[in-house]
């Protein structure tokens, strides 16, 4: 078993780490303070090719693997989780379903701008009464005169309300089959009649990312905007969520590492009773736990990403198990890391002048998005055969 990154993966890591240090980190505090979307940062990520990392050169991508994408998300999130989630959602949730399930025409129309980062596409699954329970989808789409007429609502949708947002792929009930709701995936471009992006949320963290609720009131899109097969939406989105969970785990690793970096640097500088607090065993134990958990999280995330990237393995029980485990462990480890980082900083950790306050605010949602920790435990237990 080889745990070493390839030369290409190392190059991607180093490039993203330098970019995060030189471009993302200096902008992070202002974006967070003013709740601003980092258009210039996103533009530069596009120029680096990050939005096209896992896609083939045929559609304008970089031809890299899924692990390379997760490495990029980790490094970007180490500087700003809000920018990290912009990249993660754009690629894993926005572009990937189009790349994997779209027709030749759909790919040709949308992917060139998406993989270049010139435009962003969103993923609309969660509803006021249907989040983790995706089968409870209430949004309806009726086939009428060569169009889909959509009515319903989505919430907590990332990348849907920016100046460069091109559209959203939603799940909607398109009929009934064998007594159950038939769920399909439908692409809704920005500006479609009846498609409304509502006022953005006041969020605890991720202030540099874009998040809005959506509503659809007799929203009309052409029949050819169906993504994949009719009734295949539930299966498609479950596959999409598997990759998304691994990517969120990678984001969590980035935040955990950022917490360790900040806490270690502060502990070496802050002095009490005549010596740096890094010499005190109480602090050393916290730092040791943070380092250990960050490395364990990184290892399971990389294993999950490599397994997901194997052709034909995306929906296997092994990959679903690894995705759930990596997302669960990494998100909870990053929360513990943020808590410890604030504690090590003492009173300064409670002040927004120090980045650990932002890390603490940003990290909690990692235990919620892409399936809560409780859902991950349920999935793991089910896959164990309980």
Image (tube, rainbow, N blue to C red):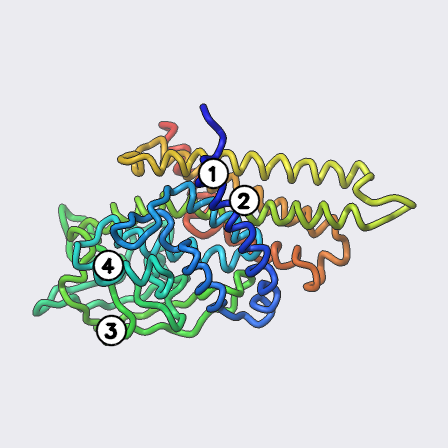
Quickly name the residue at label 2.
253
Closest to the camera, between mark 1 and mark 3, is: 1
Q: Position of residue 237 (x, y in %)?
A: 29, 49
What residue is rendered at 45% in x and 52% in y? 369
SS at mark 4?
strand
Numbered-mark total: 4
- Using the image as rendered, state which of residue 274 and residue 200 is in the foreground: 274
Residue 383, numbered label: none
Contact? badges 4 and 2 (CB < 8 Å): no
Q: Is residue 284 left or right of residue 331?
A: right
Q: Position of residue 268 (x, y in %)?
A: 78, 46
The alpha-carbon separation of the residues under discs 3 and 2 comes to 38 Å
What residue is rendered at 45% in x and 35% in y? 6
- Counting residues from the start of the chain, the first of labels 4 and 2 encountered is 4
Closest to the camera, between mark 1 and mark 4, is: 1
Q: Is residue 49 left or right of residue 11?
A: left
Quickly name the residue at label 3.
192
Asked where in the image residue 90 lies, by quadrant, the reply is bottom left
Image height check: is 13 above or below 188?
A: above
Quickly name the residue at label 4.
172
Q: Does the rendering let one see residue 295? A: yes
The alpha-carbon separation of the residues under discs 1 and 3 comes to 38 Å
Quickly name the residue at label 1.
301
The alpha-carbon separation of the residues under discs 1 and 4 comes to 31 Å
The alpha-carbon separation of the residues under discs 4 and 2 comes to 33 Å
Q: Position of residue 230 (x, y in %)?
A: 15, 53
SS at mark 2?
helix
- Counting residues from the start of the chain, the first of labels 1 and 4 encountered is 4
């Amino acid at each position: 078993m080889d745990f070493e990154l390839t030369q290409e993966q190392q190059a991607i890591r180093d490039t993203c780490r330098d970019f995060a240090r030189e471009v993302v980190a200096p902008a992070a505090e202002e974006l967070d303070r003013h709740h601003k979307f980092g258009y210039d940062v996103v533009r530069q990520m596009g120029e680096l090719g990050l939005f096209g990392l896992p896609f083939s050169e045929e559609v304008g991508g970089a031809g890299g693997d899924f692990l390379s994408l997760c490495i990029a998300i980790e490094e970007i999130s180490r500087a700003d989780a809000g920018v990290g989630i912009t990249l993660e959602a754009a690629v894993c949730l926005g572009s990937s379903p189009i790349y994997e399930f779209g027709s030749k025409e759909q790919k040709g129309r949308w992917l060139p701008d998406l993989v270049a980062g010139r435009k962003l596409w969103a993923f609309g699954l969660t509803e006021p009464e249907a989040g983790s329970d995706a089968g409870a989808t209430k949004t309806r789409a009726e086939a009428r005169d060569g169009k889909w007429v959509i009515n319903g609502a989505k919430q907590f949708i990332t990348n849907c309300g920016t100046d460069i947002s091109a559209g959203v792929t939603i799940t909607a009930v398109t009929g009934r089959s064998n007594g159950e709701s038939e769920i399909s995936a439908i692409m809704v471009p920005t500006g479609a009649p009846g498609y409304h992006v509502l006022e953005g949320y006041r969020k605890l963290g991720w202030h540099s990312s874009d998040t809005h609720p959506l509503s659809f009131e007799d929203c009309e899109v052409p029949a050819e905007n169906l993504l994949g097969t009719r009734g295949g939406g539930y299966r498609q989105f479950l596959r999409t969520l598997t990759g998304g969970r691994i990517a969120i785990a990678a984001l969590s690793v980035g935040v955990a590492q950022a917490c360790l970096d900040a806490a270690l640097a502060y502990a070496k500088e802050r002095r009490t009773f005549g010596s740096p607090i890094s010499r005190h065993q109480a602090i050393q134990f916290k730092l040791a736990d943070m380092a250990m958990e960050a490395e364990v999280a990184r290892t399971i995330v990389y294993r999950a990403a490599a397994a997901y990237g194997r052709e034909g393995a995306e929906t296997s029980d092994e990959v679903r198990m690894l995705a759930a485990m990596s997302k669960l462990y990494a998100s909870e480890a990053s929360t513990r890391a943020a808590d410890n980082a604030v504690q090590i900083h003492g009173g300064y950790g409670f002040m927004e002048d120090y980045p650990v306050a932002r890390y603490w605010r940003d990290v909690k949602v990692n235990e919620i998005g892409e399936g809560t920790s409780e859902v991950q435990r349920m999935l793991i237990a089910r896959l164990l055969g309980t």
